[in-house]
Image: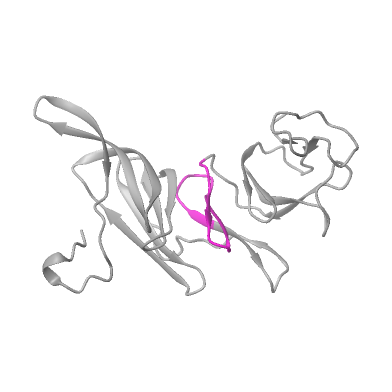
Amino acid sequence: QPTTIWLSESGNFYGFSPGSNDSDGMAFTIAADQADSISWLASHKMILFGTAGSEGKLASGDQVLTPTSVKAELETFYGCSGIKPVLVGGSGILFVQLGDRRVRELAYNWESDSLISPNMNLLSDHITAGGIKELSFAKEPDPILWCNMVDGSLTGMTYERQEQVVGWHKHDTDGLIKRICCIPFGQRYEVWALVTRDLVGGKFKSIEYMEYYNPYETEIKDAFFV
């Protein structure tokens, strides 16, 4: 049942028995002209979903979702990769389009009263040409979407939606990055990675984190921006 979404009972994470009461679990099959398998679910003021051929939401008008009121609304039709999307501030989510090359944002647009999916790679389509395999988002000190690439490199996108800032950048190292994760630490986020490196004696895997820099540093001798 690749197009079916199951939601648990209210207050019972492990109870999925469907029924007609408001507190019962739900089993809902997306009605579309293509049986595209569901790639991911995300919660952002509503339940959003991405399939291999479209993006949409589970809605119930202005009401709470119940077994008798839930319905699926398809909003855009780009198609999604199976890579887990990330939530960004109060605007929406960032997800990888099918093909693993483009990052898109799924966000509400007041003018059209619907969800839209603008292309975040519009001016930098080449920078993710190798393919994306994982996303992670750091909120502080700079909002950056980190993309772990198929070839083991690391790519970032500095992103401020309200200020219309979308800036891509590549980060090279003498190893292959296998996994990444942004972890809150104090008043900032640290970028951690599982890295494979060729060292004396053979290949070694290590857990590393990116050196922190202070963007407000005034002393040149203490500034660290690499």
Q: Is residue 138 left or right of residue 3?
A: left
Query: Where is 96 relative to 152, above or below?
Result: below
Q: Nearer the viewer, residue 157 or 88?
A: 88
| The C terminus: image quadrant | bottom left
The number of numbered discs placed on residues in the rendered structure image is 0
Q: Residue furthest front?
A: 186
Q: Residue furthest top?
A: 201
Q: Nearer the viewer, residue 3 or 178?
A: 178
- The quarter holding residue 132 reads top left
Q: Is residue 62 left or right of residue 50?
A: right
Color style of the picture: one colour
- Residue at the (21%, 46%) spot, across then down: 173
128 is within the stretch colored magenta: no
Question: Residue 140 at x, y = what percent?
Answer: 39, 60
Query: Where is 186 relative to 208, above or below?
Result: below
Question: Residue 148 at x, y = what percent?
Answer: 37, 45
Question: Residue 82 at x, y = what percent?
Answer: 54, 39
Question: Residue 101 at x, y = what percent?
Answer: 45, 49
- Residue at the (69%, 74%) spot, across then down: 111
- Residue at the (78%, 35%) spot, across then down: 9
Q: Nearer the viewer, residue 61 or 126?
A: 61
| The N terminus: image quadrant | top right
- The quarter holding residue 7 reads top right
Q: Is residue 177 left or right of residue 60?
A: left
The magenta segment is 83-104
Q: Nearer the viewer, residue 137 or 30?
A: 137
97 is within the stretch colored magenta: yes
Query: Where is 71 relative to 75, above or below?
Result: above
